[in-house]
Amino acid sequence: GQAPPPRHVQHMSMTCPGHVPQAGRLLHLEALVDMKSPTASTLNAWGRRATYKWYVFSDYLLVCRPKGEGFAKKALWPLAALRVAAANTTPPETHASFAKKPERDKSERDKAEVFRVWHEEKEKPLGEFKCWAQSETDMLAVVQRLQVLIDAAVEQRDDMIQRGMNRLTLEG
């Protein structure tokens, strides 16, 4: 697809005060993704499957819900803290909610377009989301692109920690 005019992205970020894209922040990917949190109550919006618009920047994932003719911010997550995997690949054993599940019957395999996103820190309220891309091709594209960006964000974060950002912040 076509990238939206920059004005649109600027407008989007105005709904998230303090998170207006900085000069170095690039919009890498836009996707329509259905999301649902298996652990959330159905009274909670995350507990029901719904379609969201994803804007993937170099350092954040902005999740928006349809509102009127546009989209409104639903969540903003730093990429460095996210993990992603296609649903039918073997998930990493380190992730608690995956580890607890008994081996699933083959007939229960997820549809090809399903993938999962979760937070690296288990105690965070984000938990795990089941996501549906528009197609298997879309899912593979989103997962691969997201993985590359997450890896880069993690590397950048670790780099900053090593350089002791605290000292720089105090001086600035």
Image (spheres, rainbow, N blue to C red):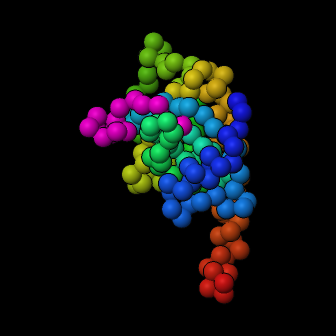
Q: Nearer the viewer, residue 62 or 12?
A: 12
Q: Which residues are magenta?
A: 39-53
* Picture layout, residue 132 above or below residue 12: above
Residue extending furthest top? 107
Residue at image x 57%, y 44%? Answer: 83
* Picture layout, residue 103 above or below residue 44: above
Quarter occupied by residue 45: top left
Q: Is residue 129 left or right of residue 4?
A: left
Q: Nearer the viewer, residue 104 or 12?
A: 12
Q: Is residue 41 magenta?
A: yes
Residue at image x 67%, y 62%? Answer: 22
Can residue 94 be seen? no
Measured as percent of width and height from the top left, residue 88 is found at 55, 24
Measured as percent of width and height from the top left, residue 85 is found at 58, 35
Can residue 84 be seen? yes
Residue at image x 58%, y 51%? Answer: 11
Measured as percent of width and height from the top left, residue 118 is found at 50, 43
Residue at image x 64%, y 58%? Answer: 21
Locate the N terminus and report the quarter of the image it occupies. top right
Q: Is residue 164 left or right of residue 66?
A: right
Measured as percent of width and height from the top left, residue 65 is found at 46, 39
